[in-house]
Image (cartoon, rainbow, N blue to C red):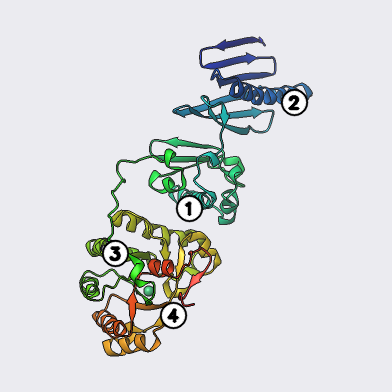
Amino acid sequence: MILIVFFIQHQSKHEIHILKTGKYYQLKINYPLLHSKEIDSEIKEYVYKNKKEFLNKVSKIKNIEKSGKYDFIVQYQMSHEDNVYHIRLETHVYTGEKYIRDDKSFHYDVKNKKFLTLNHYLKDESSLEKLSLLSYYYIMEYGQNIGKSFAEDIVKEKTIPNIENFIHFDFKPNGFEILFPFYEIPNWKDGDIKIIIPYNEINELLKPQYQKKEKEILKEPITPENRNLGKYKNKKLIAFTFDDGPSTSTTSSLLDGLRKYDAKVTFFVLGNRIEANEEVLKRAYKEGHVIGSHTYNHRNLLLLSDYERMQEIKSTNDLIEHVIGIKPILLRPPYGNINDDIKKLSHMHTVQWSIDTLDWKNKDKEVIANEIVEKAQDGAIVLLHDLYQTSVDGALLAMERLEAEGYAFVTILELARLKNIDLDYTTSYFNFSN
Ligand code: ZN
C-alpha cells in the first residue's frame, strides 16, 4: 500500500484553502477571509477549535477502520448586502460510524466592526413572536410539500420565540431565508429545512431600513376614507358587524344604505368568498369600513390542528391584503369558537359580539331591527350577516331608530379608539361598554 501524504495551504485574497492528507485522516478546509480582524479571528478560532478536537479524537483511535480515512471538512456560504456579511460555516466530521455536522453563522458589519444577531433587524419584541409563528407555518408547509409531515410539537419547540432558534438567516432575492439544520430536528433524515418567508410578510417585522421590495406582489394600498372622530366623543356608540360575506348584491345594497346614517361598520369576511366578490370588498374598505377576517372556510377552529388553524387564518389574510393592500388585524372566529392557543397563533384581535340578532334564522327586517333597538347600549357590538337582504334592511331600519335616540355607528377600531381601549391579542372583545 502506498501512502500519499501531502499538505497544501493556499491563501487567495478572499479565502483560505487547506488540503491535507495524513496517514489516517484528511482535512479539507475552506473558509473566507474578510480582512477585518475581529471576524477573521472568530472564524479561524471556530475552525481550529474543531480541527483540534478532530485530531485529538483521531490520535486516540486504536483500531483504525480499513474502509476509509477519517475526515474533517469545513465549507462555507457567504452573501452580503452593503457592509454586512452573512457567513455560514459548515463542518462535517467523520471519526467512524457517520458524519457529524455542525454549523456556525456570523453576521458581521465590516464597516462598523460589529457582530449582529437577528435582533438588529427586528422592529420590536412582538416581531420575534410573529417570526416564530411564520417559521412554524412555513416549516409545516415545507413538510407537506415534500410529502412528509413533522410532529407539530417538535416544530413548535424549534421555533419558539428565542433568538437562538434563528441564527442561520440570510436575505435572499425572493425572501428572508432561515435554515434549520436537519440534525436539530429529532428523527428527521430528509435534509436541512430551509424556509423562505416572502418580503411582503417579513417586512412588517423588520426595521424600515431593512425592508425589501418584491416586485410581483407589491401593491399600492388603497387609501380609505378617514373621518374625524371628534364629533362622536359624546355620542352613544354602536358597532355593527357583518359576517360571512362579502356578497356583491347584498353588501353593495348595505354600503349604499349606510351613507344615509354616516355609518361605518366592520365586515368579517370569509376567505373563500373574496375572489368572487373582490370589487365590493375594495369598495367597502375605500369607503372607510373595516375589513376583518372570519377565516377561509368557516370551520370550527377548536377542532383543527394548529397548522390547519393557521392555514384558515393566513390564507384569508393574504387574500384580503391582495385586494385592499393591507392585512386585517381583527378576527372573528366562526361560531365565536376560540381559545388561548388560537389567539396566540392568529396574532390578531378577537372580536365577539354582545347583540345576536339571529338574523340568519328569522329573516325578517322588523324582528331584526327590534332585537337591535331593544338591546342597544353604548359600546355594544351587533352581529349580523350581509348575505341576506332582510339583514341589510333590518340593520338600516335599526339605524334609523337608533339615530333618533342619539346613537352613532362606528367601526370596531373607531369604537376602541373612542373608548380609549388599546386592543391586545389575548382578550376576546364582546363589547366596549364601560
Ligand atoms: Zn359566520
Q: Looking at the picture, how far across and down is residue 369, in whole percent?
A: 31, 86
Sequence-wise, the earlier of marks 2 and 4 is: 2
Mark 3 Cα-neighbour bin, 10 Å: few <14, some 14–19, many ≥20: some
Q: Looking at the picture, how far across and down is residue 389, in whole percent?
A: 23, 80
Looking at the image, how many numbered discs can be counted on the residues?
4
Q: Looking at the picture, how far across and down is residue 155, in whole percent?
A: 56, 51
Task: Tell me the amino acid under the disc marked 3.
Answer: Gly
Q: Provide the residue designation for mark 3.
A: 288
Dot 3 and dot 1 residues touching (CB under 8 Å): no
Q: Nearer the viewer, residue 297 or 335?
A: 335
Q: Provide the residue designation for mark 1.
A: 137
Q: Is residue 222 left or right of residue 69?
A: left
Q: Provide the residue designation for mark 4.
A: 354
Q: Is residue 416 above or below residue 190?
A: below
Q: Nearer the viewer, residue 403 or 157?
A: 403
Task: Tell me the element at label 1.
Answer: helix
Task: Tell me the element at label 4.
Answer: loop
Quarter in which the N terminus is drawn: top right
